[in-house]
């Protein structure tokens, strides 16, 4: 296994000028195997549970990680959907096994991020998503957006880095991302709600540049696509016969507003946190999900371990804080 390496100054400059950077070899592909294996095992556990409930007949256990869920979905969209939602969780990131945390906090990723963020004090966000883009399945197609469209507006001018980590080789055929370069320095573009599968969407006319200038962000397994929170991007359909698995993770300097150390202890009858929480918690860029410290030279004793990560995710997930505090976009007409 190759040792963690910082990015070169040219790569850092490219990222800040272009708004993205594709590094094809952050991980040795073997380092992603435990995560692939555990996600596959989780799919099997959920499929067996559906079988025990009498909802599913064929497990397709002979098929690999890149195929099994697609076969289950072909047999029954309801079963495919149940497994997808189980993995994604209520608001994404439902699957939070140690193998996931190992990738989120991997020293090789931390090393690259500290080059881009200019600090070793790094906070990870629970706003991570697992994306099994099934062949010819509409929900995996993500319209143009900036990740800042999803965050509270007081974080618009802060840097939050998305690390898009494919768990298979991501190609044009299987629906890799497209990115609009050199457009991340301005304001957050106008987004609308009601895009495909409930995604936010920037209409072509509201994009900061002509979408024909977008680049194709193909990336091999082991690589990472780094993007800023104001980099417009989208993804296209999967025309292959296998699943385009990926995870997207988000990181920021510990100086950027976060809810590290905050617990949503108090809630009203609807499960919404009390205003007092938002007065403190509203400092977070995405208050409903837990942030956690993943790298620190100054306070290594405060770096979150797996047990703490898992507890924070679960407590936040159960408390269902009120989303409406930072909904900011009109509905699509
Ligand atoms: O994985 C995809 O297809 C889209 C990912 C995305 O939009 C994101 O990471 O923000």
Image: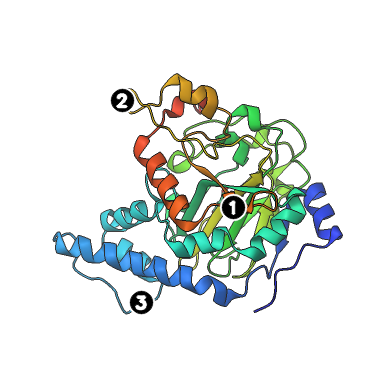
Labels 2 and 1: the sequence-earlier one? 2
The residue carrying mark 3 has its beta carbon less than 8 Å from ligand 1: no
Q: Nearer the viewer, mark 2 or mark 3?
A: 2
Whole-percent x and y of residue 318?
A: 34, 39
The residue wearing badge 1 is: 301
Element on which disc 2 rests? loop
Q: Is residue 245 visible?
A: yes
Residue 33 or residue 276, whichever sits in front: 276
* Residue 63: image tag: 3
Labels 1 and 3: the sequence-earlier one? 3
Whole-percent x and y of residue 248?
A: 55, 54
- Answer with the quarter of the image where residue 12 lies: bottom right
Whole-percent x and y of residue 24?
A: 69, 68
Element on which disc 3 rests? loop
Q: Which of marks 2 and 1 is in front?
A: 1
- Answer with the quarter of the image where residue 154 lies: top right
Labels 2 and 3: the sequence-earlier one? 3
Residue 181 or residue 158, whichever sits in front: 158
Q: Nearer the viewer, mark 1 or mark 3?
A: 1
Q: Eyeballing the image, is 85 above or below 202?
A: below
At 43% from the left edge and 55% from the top edge, which residue is drawn? 307
The residue wearing badge 2 is: 270
- In 3D space, how far apart are the residues under numbered discs 2 and 3 (Cα atoms)? 43 Å
Q: Eyeballing the image, is 34 above or below 21?
A: below
At 63% from the left edge and 40% from the top edge, which residue is drawn? 146
Q: Which residue lies furthest to the top in this view?
A: 275
Q: Eyeballing the image, is 188 above or below 62?
A: above
Q: Is residue 249 left or right of residue 132?
A: right
The residue carrying mark 1 has its beta carbon less than 8 Å from ligand 1: no
């Amino acid at each position: 296994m190759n040792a963690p390496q910082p990015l070169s100054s040219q790569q850092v400059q490219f990222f800040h000028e272009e708004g993205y950077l594709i590094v094809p070899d952050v991980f040795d592909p073997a380092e992603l195997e435990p995560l692939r294996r555990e996600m596959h095992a989780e799919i099997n556990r959920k499929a067996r549970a559906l079988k025990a409930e009498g909802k599913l007949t064929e497990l397709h256990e002979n098929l690999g990680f890149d195929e099994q869920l697609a076969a289950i979905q072909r047999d029954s969209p309801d079963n495919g959907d149940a497994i997808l939602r189980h993995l994604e969780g209520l608001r994404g990131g439902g699957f939070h096994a140690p193998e996931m945390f190992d990738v989120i906090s991997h020293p090789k990723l931390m090393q690259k991020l500290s080059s881009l963020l200019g600090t070793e004090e790094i906070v990870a966000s629970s706003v991570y998503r697992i994306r099994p883009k099934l062949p010819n399945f509409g929900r995996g197609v993500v319209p143009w957006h900036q990740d800042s469209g999803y965050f509270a507006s007081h974080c618009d001018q802060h840097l939050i880095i998305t690390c898009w980590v494919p768990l298979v080789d991501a190609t044009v055929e299987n629906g890799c991302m497209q990115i609009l370069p050199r457009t991340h320095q301005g304001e957050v573009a106008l987004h609308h709600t009601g895009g495909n599968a409930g995604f936010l969407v920037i209409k072509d006319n509201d994009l900061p540049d002509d979408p024909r200038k977008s680049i194709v962000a193909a990336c091999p397994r082991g690589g990472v696509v780094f993007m800023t929170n104001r980099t417009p991007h989208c993804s296209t359909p999967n025309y292959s016969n296998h699943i385009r698995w990926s995870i997207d993770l988000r990181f920021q300097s510990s100086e950027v507003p976060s809810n590290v150390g905050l617990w949503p202890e108090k809630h009203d009858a609807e499960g919404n946190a009390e205003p007092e929480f938002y007065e403190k918690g509203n400092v977070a860029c995405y208050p409903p999900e837990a942030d956690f410290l993943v790298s620190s030279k100054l306070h290594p004793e405060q770096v979150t371990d797996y047990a703490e990560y898992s507890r924070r995710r679960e407590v936040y997930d159960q408390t269902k804080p009120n989303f409406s505090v930072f909904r900011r976009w009109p509905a699509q007409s």
